[in-house]
Image (tube, rainbow, N blue to C red):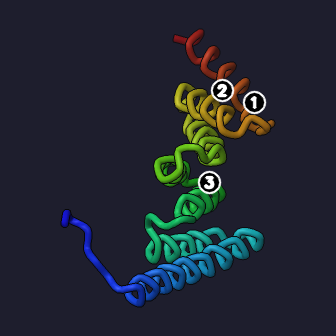
Amino acid sequence: MGCSKHSSNGEQKQKKSKTDDTTSKADDFKTKGNQYMVQKQYQNAVQCYTSALDLSPTGINSHIYHLNRSAAHCALGLHQEAVIDAQKSSELRPDYGKAYVRLGYSMFQLCNYEGAIKAYQAALVYYPESIASRNYLKKAKCKLDSVRQLQ
């Protein structure tokens, strides 16, 4: 009867419980990472978010773990790594506007103004109340115009 695997109700509950437990442990790492961010211990935060992703690479909150690790990378000045995590966050949840905000910021810091413009435009589709996106979109357009004038 197709490719589906039949399992008992008890097996389904056990799988759900294991998933819930993994998500809970991953969320605990995220919470600890958030505490490290407040304390400006960014490398420790990166390690915690990485641990959360190791436990739950595609789980319900994985887009948040990637975004938070992206923020920690930004704080460390590691903007290329921040871009990678922000992109992964947006892949996991394409309607998550904050991922595009972080992506735009990281690209802006790398002087990729065209990429920043695209990211901020996407951010405003999903997160229209983002004042930072509006402001940085203007800045990125100005920077891009300046770069083009120098060429």
Q: What element carries label 2?
A: helix
- Name the residue beneath numbered marker 2: 140
* Residue that appears at 53% across and 50% down: 93
Amino acid identity at mark 2: Ala
Q: Which dot marks residue 134?
A: 1
- Vertical placement of 123 versus 74: above or below? above
Amino acid identity at mark 1: Arg
21 or 134: which is nearer to us?
21
* Residue that appears at 76% across and 73% down: 39
Q: In this view, does 92 lie to the left or right of 75?
A: left
Label located before the other in sequence (1 or 2): 1
How far apart, in angstroms, are the residues tagged by discs 3 and 2? 17 Å
- Name the residue beneath numbered marker 3: 74
Q: In this view, does 45 lie to the left or right of 18?
A: right
Label located before the other in sequence (3 or 2): 3
Viewer-nearest of labels 3 and 1? 1
On the image, the x and y values in percent for residue 105 come to 64, 41
- Vertical placement of 118 versus 39: above or below? above
Within-10-Å neighbours for mark 1: few <14, some 14–19, many 20+: some
